[in-house]
Image (cartoon, rainbow, N blue to C red):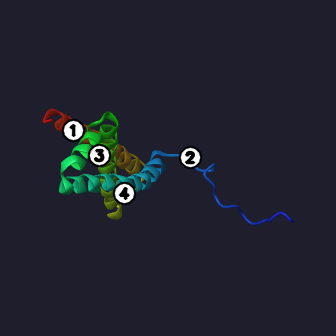
Amino acid sequence: MAPSSRPLSPHLSIYRFTLTMTMSIVHRATGIALYGGTLLLVLWLVAAAVGGGFFDFVTWLFGMWLGQLVLFGYTWVLFHHMFGGIRHFVWDTAKAMDANGRELAVRIQLGASILVTLIVWAIFVWFK
C-alpha cells in the first residue's frame, strides 16, 4: 500500500495535557457515576418504603466504612458535576474563555467541590 500524502489528524501525543482537559474527562466520568449513586438513593428510598428488616439491612450497609466511603464519593461526584455545570454555564456567557480564565475556573470548580463535600460531611458527622 502506497503511503498517503494527506495530513494526519492531531493525536493526544501532540497536545499538552492540561487541567482543563482533565476536568473535561472527569466531568463526563462524574456524570456516569451519578447514575450509580442515584441507584443507591433509590435503593434507600425503596428500603424506607418497604421498612422492617430490609431498611435495617440497607442502613447497616450504608453505615459500614465501605458504604460511608461510597457515599462520600457520591457526594463529591454530585458537587463536582454541579460546579462543572456552573463552569460551563459561565463559559456559555463567553466569560473566562482565555487561557488564564479557563484555568482559574477549573481550579475554582475543583476546590469548591472538595470544600463543599468536606463541609457537608463535617455537618453530617457532627449532627450524627
Identify residue for label 1.
119
Instruction: Name the mark nearer the viewer: 2 or 1.
Output: 1
Quarter of the image containing the N terminus?
Answer: bottom right
> What number of labels is visible?
4
Q: What residue type is labelled 2?
A: Arg
Pick the residue in front: 127 or 41: 41
Identify residue for label 2.
16
Rendered view: 67 above or below 45? above
Quarter of the image containing the C terminus?
Answer: top left
Of callouts 1 and 3, the N-terminal one: 3
Cα gap from disc 2 to disc 4, whole angstroms:
31 Å
Q: Where is residue 26 in the image (x, y as percent from the top left)?
A: 43, 50
Cα gap from disc 1 to disc 3, whole angstroms:
11 Å
Cα gap from disc 4 to disc 3, whole angstroms:
13 Å
Identify residue for label 3.
75
The answer to whether the residues at label 4 and label 3 have Cβ atoms under 8 Å apart is no
Instruction: Name the mark nearer the viewer: 4 or 3.
Output: 4
Instruction: Name the mark nearer the viewer: 4 or 1.
Output: 4
Q: Position of residue 113 (x, y in %)?
A: 30, 44
Q: In what element is the residue under mark 1?
A: helix
Of callouts 3 and 2, the N-terminal one: 2
Instruction: Name the mark nearer the viewer: 1 or 3.
Output: 3
The answer to whether the residues at label 4 and label 1 have Cβ atoms under 8 Å apart is no
- Determine whether, in the image, residue 13 is placed left or right of residue 25: right
Answer with the quarter of the image where residue 96 lies. bottom left
